């Protein structure tokens, strides 16, 4: 019934990522790298294809985990299309007033409120609020991008056939010439990673930096991250770190596996310090991040993943060695990027090759 | 429906040429849920009301080479920040194209599409409800006005589109109800055209 366009033959693959949440410091370099590269045009002001939010929190768009979509028992679940206000952000500021208004320090820089609720929320709006009470408050950061799902319910929902999953690398894309802005994709996506461009009347989402991948360059978020924590590579490459972390060692897990779409972005869940007792002694029995909270994000396998990492840590502390930890430490930066280690600054790029249009090469 | 040949202006809903053209009221019904092209759309809209606009006043005239279709309907006062009202007229591209579903996979329709928030009209090949593919610009144009709680829209394009099948379908989407693509109201059967 759906018109998902993809070639029927040729090599099949899936580019995947592992994001180690123990190392993310919430610096937003990844989100800004993406913004600068892909969403600087009119109509894209509010778009953050990469978001980094404090957890626990309402996320971006606000309360996205309550908006439905995805699959249950293989059947699509009705979803809500996030509104412009629920995404928030993309503001204009009162520069004119501050710099030329003659008001001196009687005014200050603030977003201009267009009266549509967009100044009441934004990406990482609830930064560092987190959960718990002093002295056992806790939080961590969760970078999120399109999961380039194995079963892209976004593409399956589209009546015009504008969306497709590339056979060779599993990247989920949209032919912007064929998108009519109907936004069933945005409703159907359980991760709420599809944005609407109100200027162009089309939906848009993370393209996994496919023009970079095609030139052997890692996606901008991964390459710019100073934390050495975003692995990129072929999921089924048995020699690569992603396959080992996900399939061999089970320490990297998809976010909300119950959404049923088969995410190809995996997370190493965060370990946390132990809780403090009332007398400030350490409670070695209880981790500070409630395990049930992590289970609500990463499913029941999170407990085994954390236990594995903890036992590896314990072994190394006793003088042993650990391939898992060696892998997660990432001594050599380029080890993160699998086959995508090319330096974009070294590529011979003619000016015209830089402009990318998201349309299909043929057909 | 008679398609009169008119020498006066027809390009916008208030144009003088329309004063001599008789319109007729056309019934619109919700495009059937089971004809919707994706399972997601069928799941989402099961049990939800749509196809809110029940009838439209339709008039058609030509200048000999271009067809002008004037649509008028009562619009709900409610507005939706995300979705805009829209309307279309469409013509069978082949003999068997079904009217109520805006064509089908093997019998498409040529569809002229207007959407309240877009500057330009669009020309589509429709192969089912909302199964729209761009058909070049094709010279399709639209002009609209919103007065007295209703829309008046003129869609225009090549008379040849209408001549090949000699019949016309109409669809209207109520944006305040988030209607779009196949979720809307359309003519269940073709309106036969008598082109002068
Ligand atoms: S995360 Fe959403 S937009 Fe990305 S492939 Fe999955 S369903 Fe589609
Ligand atoms: S750039 Fe790296 S460390 Fe900074 S927020 Fe993004 S993932 Fe975290």
Image (spheres, coloured by chain):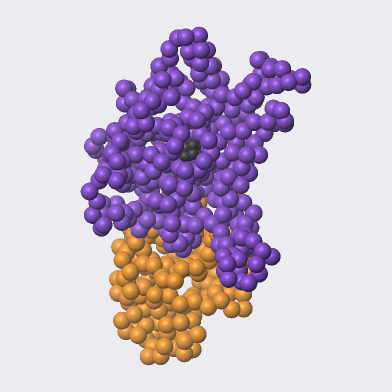
Chain colours: A purple, B orange
- In the figure, B178 relative to B87: above or below? above
Residue at 47% over, 29% down: A20
Q: Looking at the image, which residue sits at the far right? A: A278
Please indicate, yes or no, whether residue B179 appears anywhere in the rendered image.
yes
Residue at 37% over, 33% down: A232
Please tell me which residue lies in front, A194 or A335.
A335
Please tell me which residue lies in front, A45 or B139.
A45
Q: Quadrant of the N terminus of chain A?
A: top left
Please indicate, yes or no, whether residue A153 appears anywhere in the rendered image.
no
Total number of numbered discs in the rendering: 0
Residue at 23% over, 37% down: A10
Q: Quadrant of residue B133?
A: bottom left
Q: Where is residue A316 in the image (x, y as percent from the top left)?
A: 48, 13
- In the figure, A159 relative to B146: above or below? above
Please tell me which residue lies in front, B164 or A346.
A346
Q: Position of residue A247 (x, y in %)?
A: 41, 22
Residue at 46% over, 34% down: A227
Q: Position of residue A198 (x, y in %)?
A: 49, 61
- In the figure, A121 relative to A145: above or below? below
Q: Where is residue B21 in the image (x, y as percent from the top left)?
A: 46, 85
Please tell me which residue lies in front, A317 or B128.
A317
């Amino acid at each position: 019934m759906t018109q998902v366009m993809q070639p029927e033959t040729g090599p099949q693959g899936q580019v995947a990522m592992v994001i180690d949440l123990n190392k993310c410091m919430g610096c937003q370099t990844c989100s800004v790298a993406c913004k600068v590269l892909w969403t600087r045009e009119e109509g894209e002001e509010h778009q953050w294809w990469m978001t980094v939010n404090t957890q626990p929190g309402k996320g971006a768009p606000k309360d996205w985990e309550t908006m439905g979509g995805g699959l249950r028992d293989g059947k699509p679940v009705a979803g809500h299309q996030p509104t412009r206000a629920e995404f928030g952000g993309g503001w204009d500021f009162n520069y004119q007033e501050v710099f030329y208004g003659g008001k001196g320090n009687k005014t200050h820089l603030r977003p201009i409120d267009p009266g549509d609720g967009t100044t009441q929320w934004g990406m990482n709006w609830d930064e560092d609020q987190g959960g718990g009470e002093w002295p056992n408050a806790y939080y961590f950061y969760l970078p999120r991008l399109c999961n380039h799902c194995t079963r892209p319910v976004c593409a399956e929902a589209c009546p015009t056939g504008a969306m497709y999953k590339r056979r060779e690398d599993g990247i989920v894309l949209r032919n912007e010439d064929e998108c009519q802005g109907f936004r069933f994709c945005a409703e159907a996506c359980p991760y709420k990673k599809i944005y609407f461009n109100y200027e162009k009347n089309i939906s848009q989402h993370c393209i996994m930096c496919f023009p970079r991948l095609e030139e052997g360059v890692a996606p901008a978020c991964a390459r710019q991250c100073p934390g050495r924590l975003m692995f990129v590579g072929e999921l089924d490459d048995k020699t690569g770190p992603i396959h080992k972390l996900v399939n061999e060692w089970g320490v990297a897990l998809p976010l909300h596996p119950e959404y049923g779409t088969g995410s190809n972005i995996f997370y190493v869940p965060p370990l946390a310090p132990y809780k403090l007792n009332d007398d400030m002694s350490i409670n070695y029995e209880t981790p500070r991040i409630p395990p049930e909270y992590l289970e609500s994000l990463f499913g029941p396998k999170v407990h085994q993943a954390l236990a594995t990492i903890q036992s590896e840590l314990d072994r190394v502390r006793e003088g042993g060695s650990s391939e898992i930890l060696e892998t997660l430490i990432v001594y050599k930066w380029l080890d993160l990027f699998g086959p995508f280690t090319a330096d974009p600054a070294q590529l011979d790029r003619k000016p015209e090759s830089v402009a990318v249009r998201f349309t299909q090469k043929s057909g | 429906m008679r398609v009169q040949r008119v020498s006066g202006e027809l390009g916008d809903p208030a144009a003088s040429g329309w004063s001599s053209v008789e319109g007729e009221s056309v019934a619109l019904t919700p495009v059937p849920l089971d004809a919707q092209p994706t399972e997601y759309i069928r799941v989402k809209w099961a049990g939800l009301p749509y196809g809110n606009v029940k009838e439209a006043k339709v008039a058609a005239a030509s200048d000999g080479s271009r067809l002008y279709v004037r649509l008028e309907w009562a619009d709900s006062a409610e507005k939706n920040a995300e979705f805009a009202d829209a309307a279309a007229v469409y013509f069978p591209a082949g003999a068997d194209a079904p009217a109520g579903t805006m064509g089908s996979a093997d019998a498409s329709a040529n569809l002229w599409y207007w959407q309240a928030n877009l500057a330009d009209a669009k020309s589509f090949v429709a192969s089912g409800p909302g199964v729209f593919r761009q058909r070049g610009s094709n010279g399709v144009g639209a002009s609209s006005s919103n007065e007295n709680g209703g829309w008046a829209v003129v869609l225009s394009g090549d008379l040849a589109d209408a001549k090949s099948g000699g019949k016309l379908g109409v669809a209207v989407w109520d944006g305040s109800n988030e209607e779009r693509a196949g979720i809307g109201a359309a003519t269940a059967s073709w309106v036969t055209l008598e082109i002068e």
